[in-house]
Amino acid sequence: MSTEICYNREIMTNILFISWIALILYVLLETDAPVKYAEFFGLKVVKYKEFKEKQDMFPDLKYKNFLSTYYGNFLVYLLTCQECLCVWLNIIGFLIFPHWLHGWAFFGITTIGSLFLIALFNFILRKLYE
């Protein structure tokens, strides 16, 4: 197998990983999916009833802002901070799939790439809905 094919495979797997991290960040931090799924499965630890009450008072309230405002502790901060969550998801991914992601040499690139992709996606969505 030529080195060019191996190099292209490394790039493609890391781009795929960057895309998955950006998708997870978007779903968890920019949508109400965690609240909807928690409501569907009856997970009271998510505090979806309290969130709905606060959202009735403040219609633009996002779940991550609700958590950081009303339940601000270190763990909640790590879960609602986009940059922190991105770094931890990348660390978990590199610990679980070290050979698939071709070693820790790509860690910085995938972390910055994930943050760039989610920022680009948010920018495009903002422009579409203006």
Image (tube, helix red, strand yellow):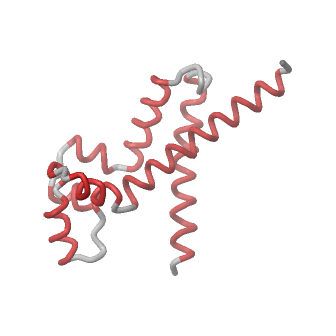
**Quadrant (top left/top right/bottom left/bottom right) for the N terminus:** top right
- Check the image and name the residue furthest to the front: 41
Q: Is residue 91 left or right of residue 53?
A: right
Residue 72 percent coordinates (x, y): 18, 51
Q: Is residue 121 left or right of residue 95?
A: right
Residue 69 percent coordinates (x, y): 19, 59
> Residue at the spot x=27%, y=61% of the render?
65
Residue 47 percent coordinates (x, y): 16, 56
Residue 89 percent coordinates (x, y): 42, 37
Q: Is residue 94 left or right of residue 36?
A: right
Judging depth in this view, the residue of 68 and 30 nearest the camera is 30
Judging depth in this view, the residue of 118 and 1 nearest the camera is 1
Does residue 39 sit above or below 56 in this rendering?
Answer: above
Does residue 100 sit above or below 64 in this rendering?
Answer: above
Does residue 7 sit above or below 22 in this rendering?
Answer: above
> Residue at the spot x=19%, y=60% of the render?
48
Where is residue 39, by image quadrant? Answer: bottom left
> Residue at the spot x=54%, y=66% of the render?
123
Does residue 24 sit above or below 17 in this rendering?
Answer: below
